[in-house]
């Protein structure tokens, strides 16, 4: 794999956090937009990013870009690519795309044209061809065709890397793992030093992501297949060497506490933490949020309450959000408080001045991570101002 432009995608809103995460791995980011960042890289970067990134959804490696004004031009241009040198001839390809132009109404037609170009080129040069289908567990190709500019990539992740592989037991409205990681990384929490307290933990995603970050366990530890493993030139020895660079901290100083009113949620969180190999690092409690143990010392309290959509539900939740504000004021002084919610009217019920608001999307719902400075001692009153 030659060095080429890499496009690292994420859910909308996460890209500033992703940029920071990529830079902390030692890479130079070339550009940032709402759904991703770009940089340059080859095999080493592709393996490193797929293995380590917590806030990304996939890593695309640019095969080539060209002009195509209709499906026939797409076929002709795509067929000029030496696919026989890139894809195992007895392999399996899966083609996905984003297409926006006047030439194509149905993306599956564009995908079919691209697939025909690939298999025809390979049959003509090798006498053999890969099979194709929807499954993303082998070679995955992504086409971005906007107006007449078409770029074709390998999706080197294959199945998305936004899921981190430990959540076998989801509870109500779980956060996508990459989004939870982005919330943790957006906070002022010092991994492994400060306390991380997560009332209303549900299936435990925020607390588990905090534990993974504090111990330097990359999401790739729980995964053994990626798209890049099905591109010609993949060397399992290089991958092994890459993984052996890992340095896991088994001990952390601050506490990580996860609690929930529901015993089922706590059990799911424990099972998920076991899958992630961090259950020993998290203290689980079955408790209403206001009874959660808040230890002395610096740290953060991060909560993802439900944000509901039915009227009765909303009325009930208004009270809960008011109580969350009281809980922050009365029990969490000296900590930083965070609420992740998709309902800004409910958020107003918290009644505290926000220090910052970071916009994210959970599925398609616009959400915010609200930050509250919960001063203790003499500055206590400042945390009590209403928005
Ligand atoms: C939106 S879910 C949290 C999802 C979580 N972030 C995840 O990724 O799985 C909200 C959680 O709050 C819990 N909950 C609701 N009311 C509560 C209360 N009064 N005290 C504690 N937990 C509560 C629910 O049981 C549910 O698990």
Image: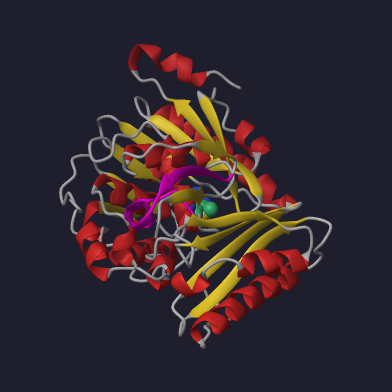
**Quarter placement of the N terminus:** bottom left
Give coordinates of residue 174: x percent, y percent. Answer: 51, 58
Relative to 212, residue 348 above or below: above
Q: Position of residue 240 (x, y in %)?
A: 22, 65
* Residue at the bottom extreme of this rendering: 127
Q: Nearer the viewer, residue 380 or 235?
A: 235
Q: At which x and y percent is residue 121? A: 58, 77
Q: Is residue 313 visible?
A: yes
Q: Residue at x 39, y 41 (%)?
A: 21
Query: Could you tell me which residue is drawn at 24 percent across and 57 percent down?
Result: 242
As for residue 309 lying within the magenta part, the answer is no
Quarter holding the C terminus is top right
Q: Residue at x 64, y 74 (%)?
A: 117
**Up-down relation of residue 69 to residue 87 (above or below):** above
Q: Left or right? Give the position of 69 relative to 4.
A: right
Above or below — where is 198 with respect to 336?
below
The answer to whether residue 251 is left or right of residue 387 is left
Quadrant in which residue 347 is drawn: top right
Left-right relation of 191 to 17: left
Residue at x 31% of width, y 33% of height: 299
Give the camera-side residue of 234 and 226. Answer: 234
Image coordinates of residue 216 in percent, x first then y, are: 25, 49
Question: In the depicted view, which residue is nearer to us: 292 or 238?
Answer: 238
Identify the magenta region.
35-57
């Amino acid at each position: 794999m030659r060095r080429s432009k890499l496009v690292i995608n994420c859910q909308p809103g996460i890209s500033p956090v992703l940029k920071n995460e990529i830079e902390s791995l030692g890479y130079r980011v070339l550009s940032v937009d709402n759904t991703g960042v770009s940089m340059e890289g080859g095999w080493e970067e592709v393996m490193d990013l797929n293995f380590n990134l917590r806030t990304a959804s996939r890593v695309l490696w640019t095969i080539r870009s060209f002009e195509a004004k209709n499906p026939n031009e797409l076929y002709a241009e795509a067929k000029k690519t030496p696919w026989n040198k890139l894809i195992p001839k007895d392999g399996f390809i899966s083609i996905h795309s984003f297409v926006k132009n006047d030439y194509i109404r149905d993306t599956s037609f564009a995908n079919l044209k691209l697939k025909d170009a690939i298999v025809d080129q390979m049959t003509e040069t090798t006498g053999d061809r890969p099979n194709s289908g929807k499954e993303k567990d082998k070679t995955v190709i992504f086409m971005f065709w906007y107006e007449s500019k078409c770029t074709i990539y390998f999706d080197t992740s294959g199945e998305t890397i936004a899921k981190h592989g430990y959540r076998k037991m989801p509870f109500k409205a779980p956060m996508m793992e990459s989004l939870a990681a982005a919330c943790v990384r957006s906070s002022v929490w010092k991994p492994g030093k400060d306390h991380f307290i997560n009332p209303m933990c549900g299936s435990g995603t925020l607390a588990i992501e905090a534990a993974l970050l504090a111990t330097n366990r990359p999401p790739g530890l729980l995964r053994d297949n990626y798209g890049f493993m099905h591109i010609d030139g993949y060397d399992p020895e290089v991958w092994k060497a890459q993984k052996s660079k890992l340095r896991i901290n088994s001990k952390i100083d601050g506490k990580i506490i996860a609690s929930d009113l529901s015993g089922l949620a706590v059990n799911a969180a424990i099972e998920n933490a076991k899958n992630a190999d961090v259950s020993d690092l998290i203290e689980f409690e079955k408790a209403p949020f206001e009874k959660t143990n808040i230890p002395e010392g610096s740290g953060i309290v991060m909560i993802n309450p439900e944000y509901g959509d039915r009227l009765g539900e909303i009325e009930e939740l208004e009270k809960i959000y008011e109580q969350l504000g009281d809980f922050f004021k009365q029990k969490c002084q000296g900590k930083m408080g965070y609420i992740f919610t998709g309902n800004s009217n409910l958020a107003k019920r918290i009644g505290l001045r926000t220090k910052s608001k970071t916009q994210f999307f959970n599925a398609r719902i616009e959400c915010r991570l609200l930050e509250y400075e919960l001063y203790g001692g003499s500055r206590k009153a400042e945390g009590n101002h209403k928005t």
